[in-house]
Image: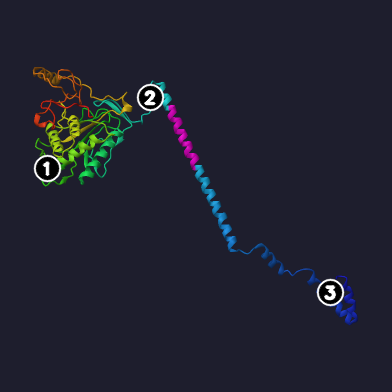
Amino acid sequence: MPLLRPLSRRCLASRGPIAALLLALSLAAPAQGAPTTSAQPAAAATEQQPVKSPQNKRRAARRSSADGEGDARAARSSRSKEKAQERADKKRAARRDDASRAERGGTDADADERKPLSKGAPNRGRLNGAVRLRSSRHLKAREGARTWGLPVLVKTLRRAAFQVAKKHGDSALLVGDLSARTGGALDGHNSHQTGRDADVGFYVVNSKGKTLRLDRFVAFDDDGNAIGLPGARFDDARNWALVQALLEDRQAGVKYLFVTDALRARLLAHAAKKRVPAELRARAAAAMMSPRDADLHNDHFHIRVMCPPSMRGACIEESLARPACAADEAKKALDSAAPAATDADIYGVPSTAAPAVVDGARPTAAPAAASAPPGAASGTRPTAAPR
């Protein structure tokens, strides 16, 4: 078409109809050969911005969600790897510690100090892996008490307190000292050194039979009246329920319940009145005792559990004899002047033989016939080991 333009100019000079036609054709040629500039941006915009349909929106949302889940999975995987590495490092450190103890001559029982272990006798020993007894709804730790013990002892006290509350309602067992965190000598006690001993207060009622919640131990006389707390009484029902719960707990292994002879007799009389089976009353009579030359247990029970089977090699069941002193020598002289008893003592051996020591001293002689459990022969005591 550009060739027509010179021709069109010559034709225009002649001012003919052919010239006008050629002029029109030359002007129309650029418009047909290329699109207008205004149309090009509009077409480009149409091609660059596709129509966003609902289906495209859903696809975009799924892609975004998948990307987020992938990031979360990667973060979780990273955290899991870090924790696994920490556990592996701890195991390697524990193995190195075990090897170091073995090189120093340590035993298998001492290899891990975090493992519960009662070492030695109740009045001369140590404690590893102790568990702390804390207050709960049915159990209250006395303020300032040292409440560390073997797991079996701590769990036994919790279960017993729960059983008493379940049977008698509004009840809370007041607990005193167990042991120090690592055992050893404890102020105010001859024993309590290996996590197997615990002092628990008696349940108390007022003159109307309502439960009294106290924050200290209260002593009782032989008639069950509180000393220094007028109107308060020894709660026969709840205190027997505690003894029964302790003895019937198959996981506990309760060996001794130290208490005065008078209160022991009250509890056994209550059990007979409630028609408790004779076998359980015999076990209670064997477990409850009042050790000689020890604290007067008229304001609390002293509970001792047996050595767990897994600790037999390190745990010593009975207390060891205390070093002799002038007072002990004087008492021995009085004992030698007294007539020898002929009945068997609580350990099932003649009284003339040297019995084992309980809480650092020999137990008292048998109580009077009135204190003996129903069905027991007068002047005899049942065997010590609970069946």
Look at the numbered discs 2 and 1 and tell me whether their residues touch, using CB distance below 8 Å. Answer: no
- Report whether residue 304 is seen: yes
- Residue name at image x 46 percent, y 36 percent: 86
Secondary structure of residue under mark 2: loop
Task: Classify 10 Å Cα crowding around label 3: few (below 14), some (14-19), many (20 and above).
Answer: some
Q: Is residue 172 left or right of residue 22?
A: left
Image coordinates of residue 131 in percent, x first then y, are 31, 35
Image coordinates of residue 154 in percent, x first then y, are 28, 36
Disc 2 residue type (three-letter):
Asp
> Is 87 within the magenta?
yes
Marked residue nearer the N-terminal end (2 or 1): 2
Specify the segment rendered in magenta. Answer: 79-96
Q: Looking at the image, which residue sits at the far bottom? A: 16
Name the residue beneath numbered marker 2.
108
Viewer-side label of 3, 2:
2
Secondary structure of residue under mark 3: helix
Disc 1 residue type (three-letter):
Ala
Q: Nearer the viewer, residue 240 or 13?
A: 240
How far apart are the two marked residues, 2 and 1, measured between alpha carbons? 52 Å
Viewer-side label of 1, 3:
1
Secondary structure of residue under mark 1: loop
How far apart are the two marked residues, 3 and 2, measured between alpha carbons? 111 Å
Q: Is residue 51 left or right of residue 71?
A: right
Q: Is residue 144 left or right of residue 330?
A: right
Q: Is residue 336 above or below residue 19?
A: above
**Placement of the C terminus among the 4 image quadrants:** top left
Q: Is residue 110 left or right of residue 249?
A: right
Name the residue beneath numbered marker 1.
232
